[in-house]
Amino acid sequence: MIVLSIVLPVFLVIAFGSLLTQMRFLSAALVTELNRLTYFVGLPAYLFTSIAEVSFGRGRAATIFAVMAGATVLALGIGYLVAKLLRLSSDSIGSFLHAAIRGNLAYIGLPVVTLALAAHAGPAAGELGTVALIAMAPLVVITNTLGVLLLLIGHERAGAAMWRSISWQLATNPLLLATGAGVACAGLGLRLPGWLLQSVAILGQMALPLALLCIGGTLVVMPLRGKRTPAFTASVLKVALLPLLGWPLGRWIGLSLDELRITLLFLACPTAAASFTLAGKLGGDEALAASCVVVSTALSILSISAVLALV
């Protein structure tokens, strides 16, 4: 029942977003605009206010991040070997690997982790939630950067222009900027005026429900065309292999049970919808990327449930 109480609310809201889009209550254009609002306003506000006023263990966040990053690098190497066995084209390999390592941490991972901590962590939920946020933000940036690299290298475009593009993305990433600002406030003991912090907190409250609705809407408008075998394979690598790699790493490095649960839930998340957008912008395999997002989202119901049941 605890697993159902965590998983069902998240995926029912996603399904509701799909239903609203199918009924044309939400248009494809509106879903796109709501995605922008969530990514550039709602989530940064949520991250900042969750971190800025809280005392937290930054070393624990770094350890969780290290486990997730290590599992991602291992999965990238395994994914490359699998892509070669599948004899994918150069265009498809970049999209395949991107889908296999880049999780939807902010839009699906955060709601799931928040509910899981509320159910399991008790009084420590607030502090652990802050640790989870700080560990998640740099991984979002790193997997996005890796995705750009993989797609561009597939077209042999590596060069100064590519590095300028990646540097600009890092410097302007709203999630990383909000996390950095929150950590600075918490670490330096800065206290914003109550009226200002409350205003930002109100904006942040829209982040998680809007994120889930947008995922549902995006799944409806995303074009699906073939690519079943590589899409299924990449999805399994993302939602199954990554947590399987993260589990022994987390145990070896000494994560607590709650920290291990946070780590594996993030790793079990489905492919980020942004992988489809990047594939379109950078000349990757859009059909494969779209199929990976949809298939991995469906499979992640099982992977997230398994983590919650076993950890």
Image: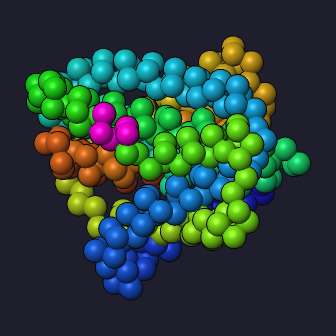
Residue 128 percent across, percent down from the top left = 75, 41
Main secondary-structure element of the magenta-colored stretch:
helix
Q: Visible in this render: residue 22?
A: no
Classify the position of the N terminus by image quarter. Answer: bottom right
**Residue 53: within the magenta?**
no
Residue stretch in magenta = 167-171
Scheme of colours in the image: rainbow
Q: Quick check: 208 above or below 101? A: below
Q: Residue at x 49, y 42 (%)?
A: 176
Q: Residue at x 38, y 23 (%)?
A: 76
Residue lying at the far left of the rendered structure: 156
Q: Name the residue nearer the viewer: 139 or 54.
A: 54
Number of numbered discs on residues:
0
**Residue 168: within the magenta?**
yes
Q: Quick check: 80 above or below 108? A: above
Q: Residue at x 22, y 33 (%)?
A: 164
Q: Quick check: 277 above or below 11? A: above
Which quadrant of the view contains residue 258?
Answer: top right
Which quadrant of the view contains residue 31?
Answer: bottom left
Q: Residue at x 44, y 50 (%)?
A: 174
85 displayed left or right of 140: left
Residue lying at the far top of the rendered structure: 252
Q: Name the residue nearer the viewer: 245 or 160.
A: 160
164 displayed left or right of 132: left
Residue 54 percent across, percent down from the top left = 76, 47
Residue 247 percent across, percent down from the top left = 63, 24
Classify the position of the C terminus by image quarter. Answer: top right
Q: Visible in this render: residue 248?
A: yes
Residue 90 percent across, percent down from the top left = 14, 28
Q: Quick check: 96 above or below 269? A: above
